[in-house]
Image (tube, helix red, strand yellow):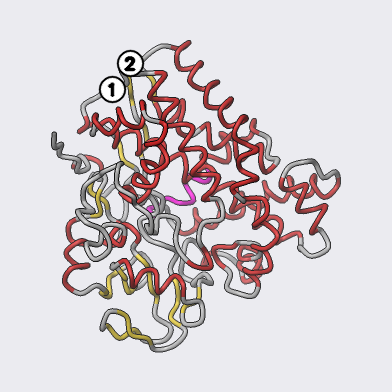
Amino acid sequence: MHHDDRAPAQQCPMGAAPDIPLHMRRDGFDPVPEMAALREEDGVRLLPSIFGTVYAVTRHDAVKAVMADSTRFSIAPREEEFGMSALTEEERARRVAGDLLGLDAPEHTRLRRMLTSEFTVRRMRRLQPRITEIVEEHLDAMVAAGPPADLVADFALPIPSLVICELLGVPYADRAEFQERTSRQVDLSLPEEEQAELVRESRAYMAGLVARAQERPGEDMLGMLVREHGDELTTDELIGIAELLLAAGHETTSNMLGLGTLALLRHPDQLALVRDDPAAVAPAVEELLRYLSIVTAGVTRTALCDVEIDGVAIPAGAAVTAVLATANRDPRSIDDGERLDVTRAAAGHVAFGHGLHHCLGAPLARMEMQIAFPALLRRFPGLALAVPFEDVAFRSHHFIYGLLSLPVRW
């Protein structure tokens, strides 16, 4: 059964926000057709972006090559990006401290080494009972409230948020405040001054938590960093690390849970596999990661020298972006990549990035999804959309793609 899974046209009312750059645009679950065409025609093309122009790299092997090459490409934030130019020089320096997604080696290596042991598959397994408990509690609450429910607000967002709060040592009572702030921080349509203000608010909030941890370190990750690495980390670095983990910890997995459930509802035979066959769950999660590529494009990099990619000359100093959504469907690396198939082995996808900056939290995200998807589908075997697919609201202006809400019934 084939569905038309393009995004409803009304999701981007004219004049509502600045147009999102072509390489970030989505059409339902897919990158826009123009980006697939670009991948097949050129592989790399200079495109207008929110701030100037950017070389979009779209093919799987080239994307991996760019992300793995930290000698020719720097990930340090470009001054014009995401409210950076509205910050003072001192604020900019603080904003970068501890932000693993804005640091090159050796600073990145030093900080990441301190965190790696906290995100091993073995360490994540210890969290399994608690994650299962959190998932069951939210399913119980949905049953008690009765249908319909908004799967984003009632399930997809609160579960990863609670997990990352407990892991980091962030009061869950503050979640509404920081969730709203983080969601706005990845909204590409916001004016620059507003972006800068959000950066300031976010740092001020985290500075308070870090100060508390420095005074009385708990058993959580912030406490561990203070106890074990307090003499190696500046306060600004601690704030930066905590900010990144908090934002990444709930923004990404929550959008995967919402969008992934919608994708499965559109493919009932595949939904049944995930629900009924425990062995099908892990491969299904990998395929959903590949197919949905919620981080449409990686963090913008700067070419440190003249370089050629897929036959296109890129000058030193140019902005370069790796388009993960097109790479993950590249026919050169995967057969029939436009189709969701939870039975395929989707190893080698770049949904978590690649190379030095491969997602640190990947083991945690995988575990959350492997627990949450089957638990949801088993609890509600009759799960269905409570609105027509055409009325589902996609988050079309966000750096991390997903759904604004997902009304369901059972």
Residue in front for this viewpoint, 199 or 1:
1
Please state the horizontal and vertical placement of residue 192, each as a whole percent of the image: 46, 59
> For the residue marked with disc 2, what is the amino acid?
Trp
User: Where is residue 280, by image quadrant?
Assistant: top left
Residue 57's place in the image compared with 149, above or below, is: below
Residue identified by numbered label 2? 410
Q: From the top left corner, tell me how far across and down residue 110 is, in percent.
A: 68, 68
- Rendered position, 281 above or below 275: below
Q: Secondary structure at mark 1?
A: strand
Instruction: Give the Cα separation between the discs numbered 1 and 2.
Output: 6 Å
Name the residue type under label 1. Ala
156 relative to 356, above or below: above
Nearest to the observer: residue 330 or residue 213: 330
Q: Which residues are magenta?
A: 181-189
Left or right: where 399 falls relative to 124: left
At x 53%, y 72%, the residue is 76
